Image (cartoon, coloured by chain):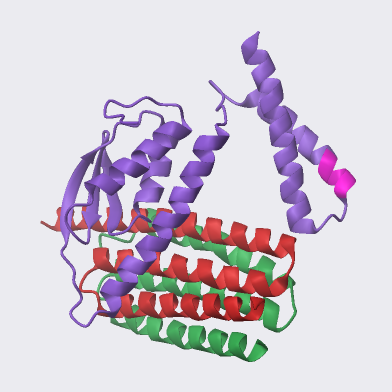
Chain colours: A purple, B green, C red
């Protein structure tokens, strides 16, 4: 059973992750207890996790993290420039952005990332349409780029996929 | 180097005080909660700086806790039943 | 050399905090203030963290600071979305 084997490896990854977080927070003190706890946590997680498990995609993940960091840096520079500029160049608009992401986790990550990308702020979700507040016009291409990176994270194919 | 870090922490503290103006002025409750969020982030910045200046690594964990609470502030604000009807 | 680079990061970080506070005080309404808050501040915290991590010269400290930054970014982004939605809905209710 492929599903069974996948659950085992998912649990093992969870054990490793939990143990590493413990090492990070405690600096290695009391690690035998942590190991026991991590194994119990991983086993419970693998046993109880509902539905289809998420299959990690390292390359897409690295690409998304790089995009996330760059976008939030540029976003900070952008809004700092607007705040410090004597005339405050604000050109407020609302756009309705139809999401093509299907998985709820992907949609959540997208909404978090939108609020960090330059000039955009996610305000509301109705069905699969996002209401986005922007500080300048012409922000859709940036949103598309983020959405594509997240779609790659979850292995979702998109209608508007290019390259 | 320690001098620079200390100066940076003091400047952040001043910015924190400036942010209080927005809490005082409002005008809406959302504005006030925004200012609280800002002071939360500033506090985290100050703590990270101080943990190095004072050589107290424990302050990093305090910063971690502050970050975790910062998330709760927003949720508590939105979920609070009295807010929204009174503003 | 490391000192020099880390000072640059810390100065830039404080600059972003300044911009965030200025934005909070100068911007005309809640939504624009939200922009200033979520972005400028988190960029500031990130740069500040890089500066301190360079000073600390310890891998564990760097990872802890990265964790703090990641959590701060996620928390403020979610809080920002919640406040924006709350504000949008209460505005619509008043109309």
Image vertical order of residue A119 relative to residue A159, above or below: below
Image vertical order of residue A144 relative to residue A117, above or below: above
The residue closer to the viewer here, A13 or C54, is C54
The residue closer to the viewer here, C34 or A13, is A13
Kindly report the secondary structure that dominates the magenta region of the rendered protein.
helix
Q: Which residues are magenta?
A: A31-35
Instruction: Name the residue furthest left.
Output: C95
Image vertical order of residue C27 relative to residue B13, above or below: above
Image vertical order of residue A14 relative to residue C68, above or below: above
Question: Could you tell whether B36 is left or right of B3 in the image?
Answer: left
Question: Could you tell whether A110 is left or right of A131 in the image?
Answer: right
Q: Is residue A84 magenta?
A: no
Placement of the C terminus of chain C among the 4 image quadrants = bottom left
x and y percentages locating residue A79 in the rendered image? 31, 68
Placement of the N terminus of chain C among the 4 image quadrants = bottom right
x and y percentages locating residue A82 in the rendered image? 26, 72
Q: Residue at x 33, y 80 (%)?
A: C22
């Amino acid at each position: 059973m492929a599903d069974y084997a996948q659950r085992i490896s998912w649990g093992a990854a969870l054990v490793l992750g939990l143990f590493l977080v413990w090492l990070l927070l405690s600096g290695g003190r009391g690690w035998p207890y942590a190991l026991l706890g991590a194994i119990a946590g991983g086993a419970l997680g693998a046993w109880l996790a509902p539905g289809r498990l998420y299959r990690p995609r390292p390359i897409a993940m690295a690409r998304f993290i790089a995009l996330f960091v760059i976008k939030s840096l540029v976003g900070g520079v952008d809004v700092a420039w607007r705040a410090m500029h004597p005339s405050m160049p604000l050109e407020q608009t609302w756009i309705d952005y139809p999401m093509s992401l299907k998985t709820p986790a992907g949609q959540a990550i997208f909404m978090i990332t939108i609020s960090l990308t330059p000039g955009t702020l996610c305000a509301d979700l109705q069905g699969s349409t996002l209401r986005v507040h922007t500080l300048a016009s012409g922000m859709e291409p940036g949103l598309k780029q983020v959405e594509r990176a997240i779609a790659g994270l979850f292995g979702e194919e998109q209608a508007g996929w290019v390259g | 180097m320690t001098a620079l870090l200390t100066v940076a922490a003091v400047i952040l503290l001043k910015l924190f005080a400036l942010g209080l103006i927005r809490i005082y002025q409002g005008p809406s409750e959302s504005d006030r909660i925004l200012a609280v969020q800002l002071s939360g982030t500033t506090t985290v910045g100050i703590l990270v700086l101080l943990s190095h200046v004072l050589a107290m690594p424990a302050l990093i964990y305090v910063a971690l806790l502050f970050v975790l609470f910062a998330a709760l502030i927003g949720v508590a604000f939105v979920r609070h039943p009295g807010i929204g009807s009174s503003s | 050399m490391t000192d020099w680079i880390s000072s640059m990061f810390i100065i830039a970080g404080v600059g972003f905090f300044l911009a965030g506070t200025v934005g909070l005080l100068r911007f005309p309404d809640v939504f624009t203030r939200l922009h200033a808050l979520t972005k400028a501040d988190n960029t500031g915290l990130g740069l500040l963290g890089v500066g301190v991590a360079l000073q600390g010269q310890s891998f564990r400290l760097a990872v802890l600071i990265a964790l703090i930054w990641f959590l701060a970014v996620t928390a403020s982004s979610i809080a920002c979305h919640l406040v924006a939605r709350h504000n949008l809905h209460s505005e619509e209710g008043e109309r």
